[in-house]
Image (cartoon, grey):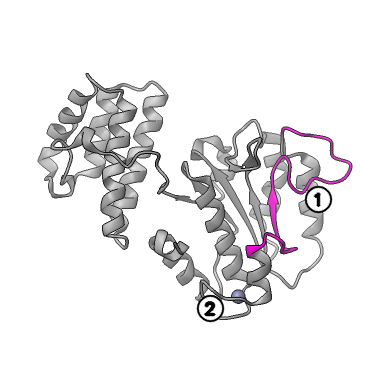
């Protein structure tokens, strides 16, 4: 499946942004959500659109597009605790200050390319994972703030994370944040909320508390997170049949926020009511 089919809203958004003259691309972007692979592919697509010397199509085979798809482009770098370490850097658990300084140094020289740095983590099998305040610590982030804030031209920083809160506020406040919904849910099942929350997009504002109550009743028999996953699975189904409707992306994001609040032990009734007030309008 092409990325433009999978994330038409985000892909269109970046396509339009990159086709304006003069180019007004953000200097710093955060992708967040549970689907790190998709976040990474989106990042690589952005790098490709910024460096393509062909027709920018999904199948473009210009030298830059090919290099970037092979993860071999000199100007598009993955920065993690295991990728692109300076030779004298023996840190293994963090993105180090040495790495930050090396990036800063490399930006002192000019480049023919649009340079893109993709910050992420990897698990033991090498799969892309999200940043957090253990693997991307405050002193390293602070070392980068100046280059993030004061753009050399044609440079972009992209940060991948599970939650925005996993990144320091100083990075978040300097970045454009995009939630990337997961399409790879282990179970697309939403029978748990069937009859309670199905067709919620037709609910009226005055129904919001009733809808919340219906969902809260389900938490007597199921963990609140499972109820919320059911809601998200249902929304993901709606998104598949209405891929151009950004409402469902926003709604999935709202439920993701509710999940986060549940994980933080916030009051279930408050979380569900606030969520329904945000979604039903
Ligand atoms: Zn190309």
Magenta residues (range): 69-93
Please check the rendered image and state whether residue 90 is part of the magenta-colored stretch, yes or no: yes
Q: Residues within 10 Å of mark 2 (few under 14, many from 20)?
A: few
175 and 239: which one is in front? 239
Please check the rendered image and state whether residue 126 is part of the magenta-colored stretch, yes or no: no
Rendered image quadrant of residue 87: top right
User: Where's residue 40, x and y in %?
Assistant: 56, 52
218 and 187: which one is in front? 187
- State left or right for residue 138 relative to residue 13: right
Work out which residue is located at the far right of the displayed protein and give it: 88
52 and 124: which one is in front? 124
Rendered image quadrant of residue 204: top left
Overall secondary structure of the magenta section: loop
Residue marked by disc 1: 102
Secondary structure, mark 1, is helix
User: Where's residue 208, x and y in %?
Assistant: 16, 37
- State left or right for residue 24 relative to residue 243: right
Quarter of the rendered image showing ligand 1? bottom right
| Residue ID at (46%, 43%) | 33
259 and 123: which one is in front? 123
| Residue ID at (13%, 49%) | 202
- State left or right for residue 144 relative to residue 110: left
Q: Residues within 10 Å of mark 1 (few under 14, many from 20)?
A: some
| Total numbered circles | 2
């Amino acid at each position: 499946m092409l990325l433009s089919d999978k994330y038409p809203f985000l892909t269109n958004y970046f396509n339009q942004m990159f086709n304006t003259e003069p180019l007004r691309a953000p200097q710093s972007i955060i992708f967040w959500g549970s689907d790190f692979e998709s976040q990474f592919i989106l990042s690589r697509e952005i790098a490709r659109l910024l460096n393509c010397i062909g027709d920018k199509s999904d199948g473009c085979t210009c030298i830059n597009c090919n290099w970037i798809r092979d993860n071999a482009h000199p100007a598009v770098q993955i920065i993690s605790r295991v990728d692109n370490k300076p030779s004298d850097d023996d840190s293994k658990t963090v993105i180090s200050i040495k790495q930050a300084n090396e990036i800063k140094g490399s930006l002192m020289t000019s480049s023919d390319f649009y340079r893109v740095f993709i910050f992420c983590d990897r698990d033991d099998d090498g799969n892309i994972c999200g940043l957090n305040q253990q693997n991307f610590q405050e002193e390293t982030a602070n070392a980068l703030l100046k280059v993030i804030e004061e753009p050399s031209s044609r440079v972009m920083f992209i940060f991948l994370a599970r939650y925005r809160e996993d990144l320091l506020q100083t990075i978040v406040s300097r970045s454009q944040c995009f939630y990337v919904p997961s399409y790879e849910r282990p179970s697309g099942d939403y029978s748990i909320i069937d009859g309670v929350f199905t067709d919620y997009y037709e609910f009226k504002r005055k129904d919001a508390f009733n809808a919340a109550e219906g969902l809260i009743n389900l938490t007597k028999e199921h963990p609140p997170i499972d109820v919320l996953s059911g809601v998200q699975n249902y929304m993901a189904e709606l998104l598949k049949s209405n891929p151009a409707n950004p409402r469902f992306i926003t709604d999935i994001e709202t439920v993701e926020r509710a999940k986060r609040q549940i994980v933080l032990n916030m009051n279930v009734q408050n979380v569900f009511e606030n969520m329904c007030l945000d979604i039903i309008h």
